[in-house]
Image (cartoon, coloured by chain):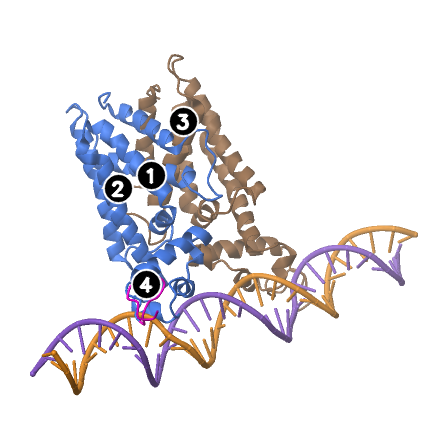
Chain colours: A brown, B blue, C purple, D orange
Amino acid sequence: MSWTKNGGESRGYHHGNLREALMKAALELIAEKGTAGATFAEAARRAGVSPAAPYRHFRDRDELIAAVAAEGFERFTKALQAGWNEGRPTPVEAYERMGRAYLDFARGNPAEYVAMFETGLSTEAHPALDQAGQRAFGVLREAAEVVVASMPAAGRPPALMVALHTWALAHGVASLFGRSDGSRRKLPMPPEDLLEAAFLVYLRGLGAPGN
Amino acid sequence: MSWTKNGGESRGYHHGNLREALMKAALELIAEKGTAGATFAEAARRAGVSPAAPYRHFRDRDELIAAVAAEGFERFTKALQAGWNEGRPTPVEAYERMGRAYLDFARGNPAEYVAMFETGLSTEAHPALDQAGQRAFGVLREAAEVVVASMPAAGRPPALMVALHTWALAHGVASLFGRSDGSRRKLPMPPEDLLEAAFLVYLRGLGAPGN
DNA sequence: TGTACATCAGTGAACGCGCGTTCACTGATGTAC
DNA sequence: TGTACATCAGTGAACGCGCGTTCACTGATGTAC
């Protein structure tokens, strides 16, 4: 059996894609035991590899987590872009759909979300992660600009402010009410609806058209 | 010197208030090394006590963190109440002041805030903590009720929804932009101003009076 | 096409360390009488 | 007021465990010629 090339459980001396396997294991560990449970040794064990192997791919545990978070931001960026869909059919509708996409991502990928926002990795020590986060915010900012531009010229609010408010609101709802573990706050409605209502009120406050 | 009763550094066989000393040490450790750095052994060391001593006061590390978080919620509740000040001079002004109090607390007590919101302690396993959190939310809810009641009777929004939106917004701003460690997102303005602006827009969207 | 060699990715054994936890103990404090 | 006793809070030594990290090594892969 040892000669089977793609037999499934069999693998040769070389793992093939250990880097990805370690990142996957780290995500599982965060999901199961929280951020502190994601250790180098345990990730190696889950990937079926010796405890020294991870050092071929990551300098230390923080770098592994940072890689996970950065990949999370990549996918997050795409999810937001898909939700926004270049502002179609109307900016306000698209904006709300982007909000739903935000929450969908946070709920569907809780471990990634924790890695992205709650591990306390410094932006200076992990510039690639910082940039990935900024690209994600760039989608919010772009959307905010279009929404603002669709408003009456007199008294348009600054788009950056709108984008920051949007981010804060979505992140607040996601991290207070959108968790999948026991620390989630109870809510008499789906978090998506809560966020949509908040967007509606907020956009009305800005003076946005009905939609 | 051993007979001095309150000599300062000297202490007898009994610590006197080890429970408080351990909680203080836990907060320092969270501030310095993050949530995972707060270990039982190190907290005991900082309190100047043997590693077995903490077991007289807390069943395990989680219970220590839960106690810290619960005390944080107590003080948080008081801070919000002080900001709200029973809605004086006007509900809207008081509401904004409460928002500032929220951020002041999060910024001034980052370790407590992390213990309260990011340790993932389950509400079922720590009912006292859950209740302390609900008391804090009670202040937001009360304030939201007064603000809603001050609005024109026609088309008043549900106060619970307003309170939840407020919480999400304040928590979002605090946890994205109000951190004191390297993971804080950069911002071209103080987070307090960002939150105040958000409140203004939101309240206008609700149809609240100018103030 | 075959061979020699360099490079790469993972091995496995070892180590020191700090943590969690238990245990019989002991010094200090409170209380009954 | 003094004494005996119970209770409480902290001791210190010990243990097993898992983690992080290093090391010389080796099997597999790629490449020059």
Quadrant where the C terminus of chain A is found in the figure: top left
The alpha-carbon separation of the residues under discs 1 and 2 comes to 9 Å
Q: Chain of mark 3?
A: A
- Residue drawn at 55 percent across, 55 percent down: A61
Q: CA distance from mark 3 to mark 1?
A: 22 Å
Q: Are marks 3 and 1 on the same chain?
A: no
- Measured from the top left, where is residue B52 in percent x and y? 37, 72
Q: Secondary structure at mark 2?
A: helix
**Does the CB distance between marks 1 and 2 fall below 8 Å?**
yes
Q: Gap between marks 3 and 4, in whole Å? A: 57 Å
Magenta residues: mostly which secondary structure?
loop
Three-letter amino acid code at the position of disc 2: Ala
Q: Amino acid at mark 1?
A: Asp
Specify the label residue B104 is tagged with. Answer: 1
User: What chain does badge 2 belong to?
Assistant: B
Q: Quadrant of the N terminus of chain A?
A: bottom right
Residue B69 x, y percent position in the rendering: 31, 53
Task: Give the residues in magenta.
Answer: B1-13
Return the mark for residue B79.
2
**Would you call the spot at circle 4 few (<14 residues within 10 Å), some (14-19), or many (20 or more)?**
few
The residue drawn where x is 35% and y is 69% is B1
Mark 3: few/some/many CA within 10 Å (<14, 14-19, 20+) = many
Mark sitting earlier along the chain (2/4): 4
Q: Is residue A78 above or below residue B36?
A: above
Q: In front: mark 2 or mark 4? A: 4
Residue A55, quarter of the rendered image:
bottom right
- Look at the image and say whether residue B9 sits in the magenta stretch: yes
Mark 2 and mark 3, same subunit? no
